[in-house]
Amino acid sequence: MKVSEALDSRLSVRGFLPKPVPVETIKAILEVAKRAPSGGNLQPWHVHVVTGAVLDEIKATIKARLADSPTGEGTEYQIYPPKLTEPYRTRRFRVGEQLYESIGIERDNKFGRLMQFAYNFEFFGAPAALFFSIDRQMQQGQWADLGMFMQSIMLLAREHGLDTCAQEAWAIWHKTLGAYLKLPDNLMLFAGMSLGYRDPDNPINNFRSERAPLEEFTTFLGD
């Protein structure tokens, strides 16, 4: 698969088949992904790979706590800026509306939307999960490195016939997960990621977010 094909076919899959992903396949992906760009070769990322009974236990723990704490424990960083300006505010609103429309959840169906959000914490049925953390001393440049590492994993997953969904939603459970994963004090949980085989029959996987035209975000200078 060409890089262009992997990029074009990658999407945030929110419905997976129960088919297991071999651990050796995940190891192969991570072995190549570690070549992702890293300023100063700091390699500031850390990843926990979770499958099987351990994954089931994590999902059960969070599910039991959702009833009393549907918004989790708060986050250690702002997932989105608190006062988005245009065009970013409209883009975020629009993608949410399109997502819920794809599975027939009306705007006034708050319970349905809440249940779909809660499905994040079942990894959308994926058989494998990754949790990404970063050393607390790192700053914006190294957070960008972590993002490139995650992107590398997502593209390599496509090469192996797999799909992913990067999930910053897991940051709202950083205390519970930090204790469960035994994260040392120097590591901050950033996000989770679902990994598995796409369910082609799930309508939510037919949804693709829009992208702005080239002219909107690019400035060309010179001849």
Image (tube, rainbow, N blue to C red):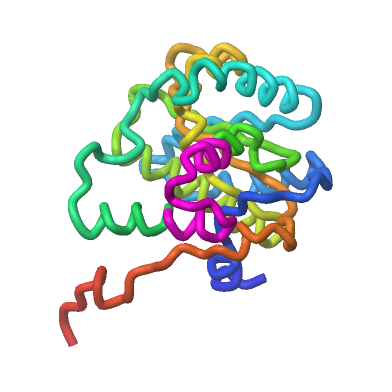
Q: Is residue 207 above or below residue 46?
A: below
Depth check: give the residue in front, 109 or 23. 109
Image coordinates for residue 104, horizontal then vertical, percent: 57, 56
Query: Which SS does the magenta portion mostly show?
Result: helix
Q: Is residue 173 above or below residue 36?
A: above
With 93 as the anchor, is 71 left or right in this view? right
Depth check: give the residue in front, 51 or 25. 51
Image coordinates for residue 88, horizontal then vertical, percent: 26, 55
With 127 as the anchor, is 116 left or right in this view? left
Q: Is residue 83 above or below residue 206?
A: above
Quadrant placement of the N terminus = bottom right
In the image, residue 109 lies in the stretch drawn in magenta: yes
Which residue is drawn at the image coordinates 62% and 35% (left, top)? 130
Which residue is drawn at the image coordinates 81% and 45% (left, top)? 18
Query: Which stretch appears magenta?
Result: 97-117
Give the number of marks: 0
Depth check: give the residue in front, 97 or 20. 97
With 11 as the anchor, is 215 left or right in this view? left
Residue that extends furthest to the bottom in the rendered view of this protein:
223
Quadrant placement of the C terminus = bottom left
Q: Is residue 6 above or below residue 213?
A: above
